[in-house]
């Protein structure tokens, strides 16, 4: 693991005391979905596959909408380049972006860019190293599409999100 790699994930039971700028993840069928907590019960994420097998914008949603009933984890980083309000500010600077690409600009790329200053995806890297894993992920996504008509998530809401001020 490099110095900026994730050191692990911790399951969350209570969300009321999450620090602003926390990197969150929620397990979905076949993959982990990532977002940045910005306070007041809101998360910025790349909608992408969270709703369907198409693309979606960077948006702010409630923590409940983000988790979509799948539970939450805090992604911990050994050495983050940015923390707290700066992470939230970086996430907010991308609101409205509509350049989702599964392999090069997904929700994990967004979050690692916010925290580490470098967009990358460990999930994509793992699929490239192990094509059988990629086939399993694609199969899980296809099953969700056929069975549920897409990924389970609520409709997007337009929300004004103030960019946190840095002290």
Image (cartoon, rainbow, N blue to C red):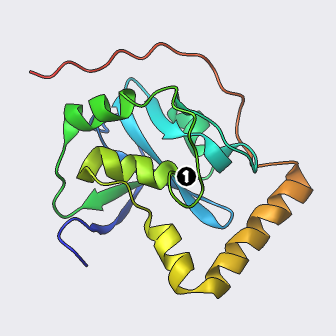
Return the residue nearer the eye: 90 or 105: 105
Q: In this figure, which residue is indicated by the disc labeled 1?
A: 71
Position of the C terminus, as image quadrant, is top left
From this view, report whether residue 101 is shown above or below residue 68: below
Q: Does dot 1 land on a helix, a strand or a loop?
A: loop
On the question of residue 12 being in view, the answer is no
Visible residue check, residue 53: yes
Which residue is at 54% across, 79% downward?
Answer: 128
Query: From the viewer's perspective, is 11 left or right of 66?
Result: left
Q: Position of residue 139 (x, y in %)?
A: 78, 72
Vertical relation: 129 (above or below) 27: below
Q: Position of residue 28 (x, y in %)?
A: 63, 58
Direction from residue 167 to residue 9 in the image, left or right: right
**Residue visible at 50% across and 49% down in the picture:** 107
Q: What residue sits 22% from the left and 31% below the top?
A: 85
Q: Quadrant of residue 158?
A: top right
Residue 20 coordinates in the image, percent (x, y): 28, 34
Say left or right for 99 vs 5: right
- In which quadrant of the rendered image does the N terminus lie? bottom left
Q: Quadrant of residue 119?
A: bottom left
> Outermost residue toward the right?
146
Residue at image point 66% right, 87% down: 132
Q: Is residue 34 above or below residue 131?
A: above
């Amino acid at each position: 693991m490099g110095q900026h790699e994730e050191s692990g994930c911790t399951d969350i039971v209570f969300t009321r005391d999450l620090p602003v700028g926390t990197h969150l993840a929620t397990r979905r069928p076949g993959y982990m979905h990532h977002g940045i907590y910005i306070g007041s019960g809101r998360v910025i994420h790349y909608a992408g596959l969270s709703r369907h097998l198409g693309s979606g914008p960077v948006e702010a949603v409630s923590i409940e909408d983000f988790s979509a009933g799948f539970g939450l984890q805090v992604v911990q980083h050994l050495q983050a380049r940015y923390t707290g309000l700066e992470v939230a500010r970086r996430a907010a600077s991308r609101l409205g972006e509509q350049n989702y690409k599964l392999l090069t600009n997904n929700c994990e790329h967004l979050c690692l860019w916010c925290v580490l200053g470098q967009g990358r995806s460990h999930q994509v890297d793992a699929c490239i190293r192990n094509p059988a894993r990629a086939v399993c992920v694609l199969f899980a996504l296809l099953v969700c599409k056929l069975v549920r008509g897409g990924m389970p998530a609520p409709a997007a809401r337009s929300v004004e999100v103030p960019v946190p001020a840095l002290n």
